[in-house]
Each structure stands twice: as structure tokens, then as C-alpha cells.
Amino acid sequence: MAFIKQLKKRQLILFTLALVNFIHIVDSMLIMPLGDIFIKEFQISSGEYSLLVSSYALSAFFSSLIGVFYLDRFDRKTALLFIYTGFGLGTIACAFTDSYVQLVSLRVFTGFFGGMIGAMVLSIVSDLYKFKERGTAMGILFAAFSAASALGVPIGIYLAAKSSWHLPFIVIGAAALLIVGFIAITFPNMTSHLSEQDEKINFKKTVKAITTDANQLNALLAGFVLVLAHFMIIPFISPYLIANVGLTQEEIALQFFCGGVATVVSAPMIGKMTDKYGVMKVFSTVMFLSFIPTLLITNLKVVPIWVAISFTTMFFVFASGRMISPNTIITAAASQANRGSFMSIKSALQQLAIGLSSLIAGQVIFIGEDETFYNYHWVGIISILFGAASIFLVRKIKVAKGN
């Protein structure tokens, strides 16, 4: 009876964390499908738009580095409440800006807190689920990413279309603060990781424990390259489909809905397949399959809407799917004692990769006099090269003791 009660409690935590991920991801993604609105309203270039996208990620990179020294020092629940409260307040503040500079500044503020959310969520899930069952748990977490695309982003686009781009940020921020209250009431204290730590450990030892471990370094590098591959084409998908393919803002919402619904189904399946067939078999297969829609989308011309949405849905399924298997083993590269610090460095590198990929794409792509985008196909090729490199890097990772 106690086991069943414990199992239900664990599932409640997992699904709440998936909801935390859902809100966080909607916020981090919302700038991209609204890119056409921001470019026109603020009269900004592709480079300035890429800075708006990457400002959140680059701020998150620095905050995640700070988290390396603190996330393992506190009760996981307390840390999550602090981080998510700051994130919610920052998101609401974004809704009340009326200039490009103010919006970039507030995205920096929000990113400071948002950057540590992923690390904390993965740390809690890794504490709760052993490696052999972690693939299924990761599938549920990544299903939240898909649900964010299927429901959150289209609703955000709809609210922006019917009112203004300010409204989605108010709704997202308010939802985050409501979840903060739910976590405060329902989550137990999470301090098991504290008992495994050296009481005399300091900042220098924290960094040394990670940087002298070749396995953890391999895992961090693999995660960094994987995210570079993943986010290289994403920021410009919506603006490209509007300017070059002829889709409307409402059709972009439909694109996210179809892709999100498909991956809500596929992500848990890929997670279960990872547990059953192994990380590398599933990862390599899904990664190679993801190259097909990457090439199709970045070379797309004017086509019927069903063709464009078919390609983007295929990309959603395989692009999100290729993140599940490697993250299962990347999270297992560190022991529980320094898992929060490791995840924070992982999160920092992930945010740096997101920011860099957006900035790189913004330099490769340019907007012509006809207001269409050029050189997007080169961004697709760069993405594929990073993806191929990540397969080699993930293969070198080993599972640490205690997982």
C-alpha cells in the first residue's frame, strides 16, 4: 500500500514538472512564431530579431553557471519555487513593454531565472527515476515540449492575433505563478541529494568534480552539439514560411498544432523504445530521419499549405524525438551528489548553444529587398553536420554509478 502511494506521489511530481516544462517552453518559444509581428512592429533586421530570440538564452547561460554552485546546496523544492517565481514575474513584465530595447532587457531578466528551470526539472526526475526507467520519464517531459507546440504556442498566436502580442505573456506569467502555489502546497521536501555531499565541498571542488571527469565532459559536449543541431533552423522556420512559402499567421498556428499533436503521441513512444532497445539504436535512427525534413523545410518554395505542414510535422516528430534518447544517458553521466551542478552546466551550455545557433543563423540568413529570406538552406546543412557529430559524441558516454 505504501509502495502504491509512493508511486502515485512520484507520478504527480513528474506530471507537475511536465507542466512546469510546458509553461516554460511556451514562453521560450513564443518569440519565434511571433517573429513576423516583432520584425514589422519594431522595424528590426534579421540580426536584431535573432538577438531578441537569443537574449533569453544567453542570459540563461550565465544564470545556469551561477546555478552550478548553488542548485545542489538547497532542497530541490525550495530552489524550484524561487526559480519559477522569478520566471513568472519576468514573463508578466514582458507584456508591459512597448519598445524593442525594453523587451530585450526583460527577456534577459526572464532568462536569468528560466535558464535554471530545465536543470532543476531534470535533477528532480533523475533523483526519482533510475536509469532503466528514465527513458519513459523523459518521454513524458519531452511530450510537454510537444504539447507546448500543439496547444500553448497556437493559443499564444491566437491571443496575439485577436488582441496584441502583449496578452500571451500575461497569460503565461499568471499560469506560472499559479503552478508555484500548487508546488508549494503539494510537493514534499527533496533533500536526499544533500546526504551524499561532502560538507566541506567548495566552489573549486564543485567545478573540479565535473571538469576532471572525462565522462561528464563528454556528456556536456554531446549535449551542446546536439542543441546546436536542434535549434539552428528553428528560430527562422515561422518567418521563413510566412515570407517565402506564403503562409499566414493563423496557418503558422496550425503548423504548431499539427506538429505538437503528432509529437505528444510520438515522444512517449520514443521514450519507451529507448528503454526497450537502447539509447544508441533509437537515437541514431531518429537523428538520421530528422535530416530529411530539415532539408525539405530549408529549401521549401511556395507550396500548398498541406505540403508545408506535412514537412514541419515530420520535423517536429523527429527533431523532438532525437532529443529524448541522448538526454536519457546524458543525465546518467553524473552521480546524485553533484547532479544538480552537472545539470546546471548542461543547462548553461544548452542555453549558450541556443543563443549561438540563433546568432549564427541570423548572420547566414539575410532579408532581401523583396522581404524574403535568403541562405536558409545553408543553415539546414550546418544543422545536419552538427547532428551527425552528436551521434559520435553520445556514443562515448557511460552511465555513472548510482543511476
Image (cartoon, rainbow, N blue to C red):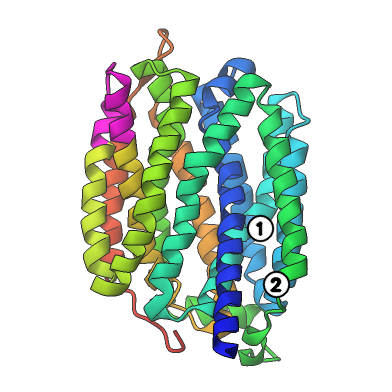
Residue marked by disc 2: 187
**In this rendering, position of residue 379 left or right of residue 162:** left
Residue 307 belongs to magenta span: yes
Image coordinates of residue 144 in percent, x first then y, are 50, 53
Q: Which residues are magenta?
A: 295-312
* Depth check, front residue: 116 or 104: 116
Identity, as a three-letter code, of the amino acid under mark 1: Ser
Residue marked by disc 1: 63
Whether label 2 touches label 1, CB < 8 Å: no
* Depth check, front residue: 18 or 52: 18
Q: Residues within 10 Å of mark 2 (few under 14, many from 20)?
A: some
Identity, as a three-letter code, of the amino acid under mark 2: Phe
Quarter of the picture containing the N terminus is bottom right
Residue 2 belongs to magenta span: no
Q: Main secondary structure of the magenta part?
A: helix
* Depth check, front residue: 126 or 53: 126
Helix, strand or loop for disc 1: helix
Q: Quadrant of residue 371?
A: top left
Image coordinates of residue 389 in percent, x first then y, are 27, 57
Q: Residues within 10 Å of mark 1 (few under 14, many from 20)?
A: many
**In this rendering, position of residue 109 left or right of residue 336:** right
